[in-house]
Image: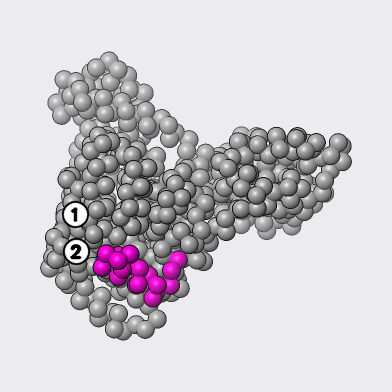
Amino acid sequence: MDKVEVARILEEIGILLELKGENPFKIKAYHNAARAVEAIEEDLKGAIDDGSLLNQKGIGKAIYEKILELFNTGHLKYYEELKIEIPYSLLELIKIPGVGPKKIKALYDAFGITTVGELEYACLENRLVELRGFGKATQEKILKGIEYYRKGTGLHLLNIASAEAEKLYDALKTDKDIIRISIAGSIRRRKEVVKDIDLVASARPKGEKGVMDFFIGLPSVQSITAKGDTKASVVLSSGINADLRIVSDKEFPFALHHFTGSKEHNEALRGRAKKMGLKMNEYGLFKGERLITCKDETEIFKALGLSYIPPEMRENDGEIECAERGDIPELIELSDIKGIFHVHTTLSDASMTLREVVKIVRKLGYQYIGISDHSKSAYYAGGLTEDKIKEQHEEIDGLNEEMTDFHILKGIESDILADGSLDYDEKILSTFDFVIASVHSRFNMSEEEMTNRIIKVMSNPYTTILGHPTGRLLLSREGYKVDIHKVIDEAARHNVVIELNSHPYRLDLDWRFCRYAKDRGVKVSINPDAHHIDDLSNVSYGVGIARKGWLTAGDVINTLPLESIKTLLRKKKEHTF
């Protein structure tokens, strides 16, 4: 059992205790322990073996013993007993936006509600209106939350699905009967949320059965939903469905293209093939009955008179016409990123100190890091007072003097207040190299109010980057209402960079708006929004979304080398950019 699973169970214990009405200190202890386990840098076994887990802040001896029981046996008696005592289905209600443990307990105590369906029915019957702490407005909000929750049922965040797919891929590629194998589907196209995992492989003659048996027998497979000679479908222990399709090696490029999708892209290409007197499907490209041999996807596109279209672009959104002209952009690569912004430290709400994160980022090969802790309005996240800012800047200056191959940029993630102002005065703002302006409150404004709020902050000369521009949390919370096109237009007018927040829960700016930003000349910054060491790898998801939005290295500011980024930030600060 890895640290992610252990942290999840500890978090669930905390929620179950809250639903039970337990001591608040006991509840907090489990939530703190969950965060502490998530924050350990090594794997769980290593932290147990070297004793560092027991010394981790937030993990007491009693909880440590429970973690050992989980790790050694895969089960926890205390957890199982809680799930019997408190209906486990109540945890599903937590996923509904706006419904927390206190509300769930009130609903359970008053009406015995344990499922989403029961809660929806109670709302439709208007039962919540007179319940203390609820009322009509809360009831309507819960109904909207249920509607949003239902949209997300059966969907998975890209990072979770990708990790599961990579495990399957790594296992399958060791099978001696496999010739070629690839992850396909929406993961390969880097969609922000994923329904299932698609794998395509070619196998040696008569090797298909062995490959299929190997696939369905993998440890992560929980159940088998279908199995044939060339296709198997399984459900993984993570709850994600996974399909494996096996073809001959000459069919592999066509199957990979077909099962990568999207459906709309495939339909458009089949239409193009038909106009050329050809037939195209997952088995090949045919002239009459003759297969046109293609060794890879590049040759398929070439046979159709097109330049290669990267998987991320295959959404039938103009990419085919672009490939016909030979104008497919040279999309950004992860290796193009030279430095990162939007990194938090222990001075606000992160689990890593400034020195720790700098050490890791240098090892990753970056040239610079933009530190941006929360501002004072975010008191709940340890937002920085003026004294804390001075303290951090002195520490940054000291570290910068120690390094010649790396530079720390002084930044802040400043809250955009309801009136569109930032929460520091100009004297304080002028001490930063850059300012990320973000909305963290008052999400329920009208579209006009929110748009005006954001437009106003972009006219502030100290606003460098607009953070997570729609505020969405994928599969959890819809973004606030905002006219994103107007926001992008205003960013162009004021030379404000727009963040592509790479956290898998955000991936915001949405890829559908990246091209509009590109066309308007607005630069993007691909930022990890890192609060833990593991979050630094979020950049790869942001790069995938940037590629999906047709962005090149030239569209992204943190592809610039150190001296160039210093110049850009200085010009912006001096209002000459």
> What residue do we see at 26% from left, 58% from top?
463
Judge by depth and name the residue closer to the eye, 467 or 52: 467
> What residue do we see at 80% from left, 36% from top?
277
Q: Where residue 422 is drawn, which disc sits there?
A: 1
Query: Magenta stretch containing residue 406, yes or no?
Result: no
Relative image position of residue 363 (x, y in whole percent): 43, 74
Q: Secondary structure at mark 1?
A: loop
Q: Main secondary structure of the magenta part?
A: helix
Q: For residue 129, what is the image quadrant?
A: top left
> What residue do we see at 81% from left, 40% from top?
286
Relative image position of residue 44 (x, y in whole percent): 41, 61
Q: For residue 316, what is the image quadrant?
A: top right
* Residue type marked 2: Leu
**Residue 234 in sight:** no
Q: Where residue 414 is drawn, which disc sits there?
A: none
Left or right: 82, with 429 as reference point: right
Query: Magenta stretch containing residue 575, yes or no?
Result: yes
Q: Quadrant of the N terminus?
A: bottom left
Q: Which residues are magenta?
A: 559-577
Dot 2 and dot 1 residues touching (CB under 8 Å): yes
Label 2 Cα neighbours within 10 Å, binned few <14 / some 14-19 / many ≥20 = many
Left or right: 453, with 343 as reference point: left
* Residue type marked 1: Leu
**Residue at the farthest top position:** 125
Residue position marked by numbered label 2 in the rendering: 429
How much space separates mark 2 and mark 1, taking CA atoms? 9 Å
Q: Quadrant of the C terminus?
A: bottom left
Q: Please say if 25 is above or below 141.
A: below
Relative image position of residue 411 (x, y in whole percent): 26, 65
Left or right: 26, with 253 as reference point: left
Going from the N terminus, do you reach mark 2 or mark 1 first?
A: 1
**Residue 136 in sight:** yes
